[in-house]
Every structure is written in structure tokens, then in C-alpha cells.
Amino acid sequence: MDFIVYAVTAAAIMTVLLVGQQLLLFDTGIFSLGGAAFFACGAYLSAVLSKNAGYPSFAAMLIAALAVTGIALFVGVLWLRTLRSDFFALATLALSLATVVVLRTVGPGGLTGMAGVPSFGTIVPPDVVPAPVQTMLLCLAVAILSIIAVQALRGQRIGAIAAAVRVDENVAATLGFRPLLVKLQIFLFSSFLAALAGAMQAHLLGVVEPRMASIDMIVLLLVGTILSGGKRAWGCAFGAMVVVLVPEVLQRVFVARAEPQWRAFLACQAAYGGVIIVMIFCGPWLQRFTGVRLRRA
Amino acid sequence: MLEIKGLCKRFGAVGAVVDVSLELLAGRVYGLVGPNGSGKTTVLNLISGFYQPDCGQILLRNGGCLRRIDRLPVAARARLGLGRMFQEPRGIAQFTAMENVLLCTLPTGSDNLLAGGLRPFALGQKRDRVARLLSSGGLTSSANCRSADLSYGERRILDYLCLIALGSHLVLLDEPFAGADPSTRQTLTAMIRDQVRRGDTTVLLVSHDIPAVMEIADELILMDGGRIIMQGLPVTVTQSEEYKEAYLR
């Protein structure tokens, strides 16, 4: 029971992160690997605000998410203007990897990160509804809200214009739409969601670690975004369940068989690879059964 | 409508456009002709803002006053009433014809989340206007087809409809007739004529299809080697020595 509550909470948080990434990649066509960096920054900032500065958890999460959006504004103005598709991906990859290094060397807690981050806190007394269940419900609410928000955004003018910018930036500009502005706004929104998810994760686990921005996290984000299908925001819930459950279940299986942890890690990476290959080759069949469609680039 | 003074643009050692000066008057159709590599498309790209000129000025008349536009980004020029049609159909492929036209009727600021980007992307009160535009191009029956599924000719017409929907005063057309069958060409010509006759729209069109240009243009501008060689009535230009020389050399 505890495991189910934890898994649902973790998947809900991952969903918040993935809807932003899905919007960025599939609607605006921006290939960014910086989601992990904003995720980790949000987590660290919220952890420091609540643990060291004494802010209540909810306030810390919101402030952290907004502050990281400010960082994203700087990054976006600097790089979206000057770097084209693959170069933007490389630059944001560097951003994520640099974040790991910075957090390891000067971040609170150094190499191992910081423990003892306050938990979410409770809204109703814990003896009425247990605290983990309250956290789960709250995370689910945020996830559903972000799914609805992103899905609604697609039907608005900005969604249509983003599609135009993705297909052909030059044509969109000749229609009077500012490609940079459109891309920047979506980038900021997705960064806000990433930072918010990071902050939620920090308060759920009680720990923040430099590897929250590592290459493993980047891979996990990519796999989740691909699995989301790209067309509907609720596809992210599916992607999130896979990327959260696969490592958890594999770890349990390997621990039960007394195998070393690195084997579980390798198996997990192999599983991700397998899932992507299945998605690419069986896309049309999966589409028929699930309604989730893989969009060709 | 548009004034160009001493415009030049180099690509490495090649002077693509050399000291071009032009004045386009409102309500006229200009045909820009010349052999391949004579700098016609470069001039269009300089006017619409895809290239920055190395020297010279571009001034656009907007609401009575002449405004310098050669340092403005593409989108800002578009909002000042500069429309551009590309050499190949560029409508948004996965949008329907109707959605493509609707996209062009969105008011300024729709690309801003805080200014109007969060209003629904739906026909609403624009239903009649969009329907009228589509029927003027003969696209009523394919209004709900994805633009990718339309024929080449229909996509060309759709691109032109988008310019009308935008309300552009100055329309730059790059090879509008290339690859179009006679009936598409006729429709396009009629639409261009109609738009020019109704308002103060100015058209600058680049084409190799001399008979089509002769039919529609009030004036021809002949370019060769990045310079304007000649400007005048279509008949005068096409019968001149300079014209033959430019195309035979």
C-alpha cells in the first residue's frame, strides 16, 4: 500500500515535468535537454528555502519555481535567439551537465546532496487522512491541472501560432508572429513546470542530490516524453508511469535476488531502450489500441 | 508605397544586389524580371527582412507616413502591411485550409500569452469573413481538407488568400505562377487584379513566366547582375535591346 501511494505520487510529479517537456518538444519543436537542470534547480532552491530559510513548503515550492523561471528567461533570451535546433539542444545539454558539477562543488551538501528537506506538510489533520495520502492527492491535483492547462493551451491562439512556428519559422514571421516570443513563452512555461516538479520531488523524498540534473535524468525525460506520444497531454501520465515504475520494480526484483545495484541500473537503461524501440516500430499498432499517436518529426 | 534607395547586398565576393533604387506607387502591379541569379529573390528577401542590407534604405508607407523598415525584424514588417508569398507553397501543412486562413486573421498580439494568445483559436465572429475569402479562391469545398492534401494549385491560391486575410498593403510574390496550371494561373491573376482594383494594394511579383507577367503587370523592372537595367511599360521593356541582351548573355 505504501509503495502504491509512493508510486502514484512520484508518477504524478513526473507527469507535471513531462507535460512541459511534451509541449516544448512536440508543439514548439524546441529540442531542449535543459529540463533536468531546471528540475534540479527547482528542487535545490525549494529545499534551501524551506530547510534553511524556514519558509513553509508550499511557499518554498512556488517561489523556487518562479525563481527558476527567471533563470530560464535569461537562458532562453540568450540561446533561443542565437542557437538553431541542434545547437540549442547541445547548449542545454551542457547546462544540465554543468548544473551537476556546480551542485556537486558549491551546492549545499556537496557530492551527496542535502537530506532532511521538510515534507509537504498537511492540510487536514494526519489522523483523518494519512500524510502520504494527502501528498499523493495534492500531487495528483497539480498533475491533472497541468494536463488540463497544456491541453487547453493547444486550442488557443498561442497553440496554433506555436504550431506554425514549429512547421516554418519564416512563414510564421511573414504572418506577423514573433517566433522568438512564441518560443520563449512556451520555454518559460515548461521550465516553470520542470522547476515545480523538482520542488515537489524534493519535499516528497526529503533529499536533494546533484544527480537530479544528471544524464540519467535527461535520458529519463526523453524516454518519458517520447512515450507520452506528443499529441495529448494525458499521454504524459502514461510516460510518467513507465519511467517511474520501471526503475522501482527492477530495483525491487534485483534486491530480492541479492544482485548488485548496478545491475538493476543497467537493466533499467536496457528497458528504456527496449521501450523506445518498441514505440518506434510498433507505433501504428499501439496507436490503434491506445489512441496515443507518435508524431513523425 | 515603397521606396528603396541605394540598396546593396553582398554574399562573400558576389554582389547579389548592387545599388538598387526603386519607387513603387500604390495601386500598381510591378513585375520584376531577369535571368536566374540576377538578384530578384534577394531583393524580395531584403524587403521582407530575411536579409539585412549592407547599405541603402528601405522605406514603407504606412498610414500616410513613410517609415524606414530595413532594420526591423520580419514579423514587425509583416505587421506594417508587408505580405510575402514564397516560391513554393508554404501553408501550414497539418492545418486545414480554413485554419490557415483563420491563422492570418488573428489580431496583432495573438502571439503574446498576456495580450490575447489565450483566446480560443476558433472561427467565432470571423466565420463569414473566412468563408467569403475561401469562396473567392474557389476553396469552399476543400475548406476542411488539410492543406497538405490540397493540390499544388490550391495551395498556391491558399497562400495568396492568407495574404488577403492579413490585409497586406504591399504584396511580394515570388514566382506565383511557377508550376501552376492555366486555371490556377487564371484564378490567381483574377485575385491579384481584384485586390489591386479594390484598394491601395501594391504588388511586386517575380516571375519567369513572361506572358503571365505581361498580362498582369502595369510596369516591368528588368534586373541583371544585381542591378536594375530598365524600368517601364511591359511592352517597351520586352522589346528593348537590353532585355534581349540580358536573357541571351
Image (cartoon, coloured by chain):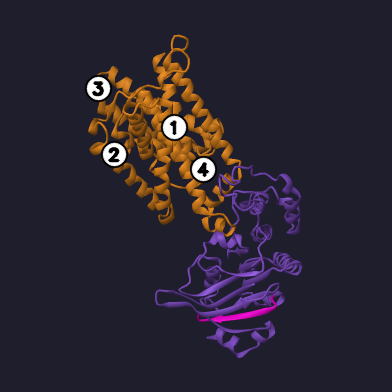
Chain colours: A orange, B purple
| Sequence-first tag of 4 and 1 | 1
In the depicted view, which residue is nearer to us: A14 or B89? A14
Amino acid carrying mark 4 in the image: Arg
Q: Are marks 4 and 1 in contact (CB under 8 Å)?
A: no
SS under mark 1: helix
Instruction: Name the residue nearer the viewer: A176 or A124.
Output: A124
Query: Vertical placement of B114 versus A263: above or below?
Result: below
Camera-near label (2 vs 4) is 2
Which amino acid is tagged 1?
Answer: Leu
As measured in the structure, the alpha-carbon distance from the residue carrying label 2 to the one carrying label 4 is 32 Å
Magenta range is B217-226
**Of the image marks 3 and 1, the number of the one nearer the N terminus:** 1
Q: Nearer the viewer, mark 2 or mark 1?
A: 1
Q: Chain of mark 3?
A: A
Residue at x 52%, y 55% (from the top left corner): A169
Q: Nearer the viewer, mark 4 or mark 1?
A: 1
SS under mark 3: loop
Residue A295 image label: 4
User: What kind of element bears circle 4?
Assistant: loop
| Res. B96 in view | yes
The residue indicated by pointer 2 is A100
Q: Earlier in the sequence, mark 2 or mark 4?
A: 2
